[in-house]
Image (cartoon, rainbow, N blue to C red):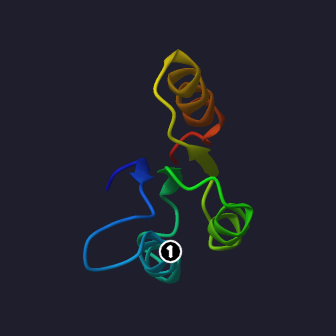
Amino acid sequence: MPDIIFLDLKLPYISGMEVLEHIHSQAALSKIDVIVLTSSPEERDRKRALELGAKEYLVKLAGPKTLQQILQAINKAPEPQ
């Protein structure tokens, strides 16, 4: 099992929110940290993703600041047990 999943909200065939719901409804998957990495700056999307169990919500921007945010989010993730 992965320790972390990077999830985009805009996916073909299914929404990222549906994927988040599924991940956190399954006992075997619910311990995996999910970081949403998306182009949507919408506050309602951020709020919903966090309610559904996302560890972090980052808006995609090209550049080193995004990479720094991703690395900080990974470092916040608890150690696997």
Furthest-top residue in this view: 64
Tell me the residue at 40%/76% (across/down): 15
Q: Quadrant of residue 44?
A: bottom right
Task: Using the image, determine if residue 66 lies above or below residue 32.
Answer: above
Image position of 7 (left or right of 65): left
Is 34 positioned to the left or the right of 29 in the image? right
Does dot 1 land on a helix, a strand or a loop? helix
| Position of 53 relative to 14 (above/below) | above
Q: Nearer the viewer, residue 54 or 47?
A: 47
Q: Which residue is mark 1?
A: 17
Name the spot of residue 73 as percent of width and height, x first: 61, 36
Q: Quadrant of the N terminus?
A: bottom left
- In the image, 53 versus 31, the foreground residue is 53
Point out residue 50 in the picture as x, y percentages from the top left corner: 68, 64
Nearer the observer, 34 or 44: 44
Residue beneath the point at 52% across and 48% down: 81
- Are there few (<14), some (14-19), or many (20+) residues within 10 Å of tag 1? many
Count of picture labels: 1
Instruction: Pinpoint residue 39: horizontal percent, then vertical percent.
Output: 50, 50
Q: Residue at x 60, y 60 (%)?
A: 54
Residue ID at (49%, 20%): 63
List x then y, in percent, for residue 20: 49, 72
Q: Looking at the picture, does residue 16 appear above or below residue 5?
A: below
In-image side of 78 versus 60 (left or right):
right
Among the 4 quarters of the image, the one containing residue 65 = top right
Q: Residue furthest left?
A: 13
Give amino acid for label 1: Met
Image height check: is 78 above or below 66?
below
Question: Is 75 on the left-hand or right-hand side of 30?
Answer: right
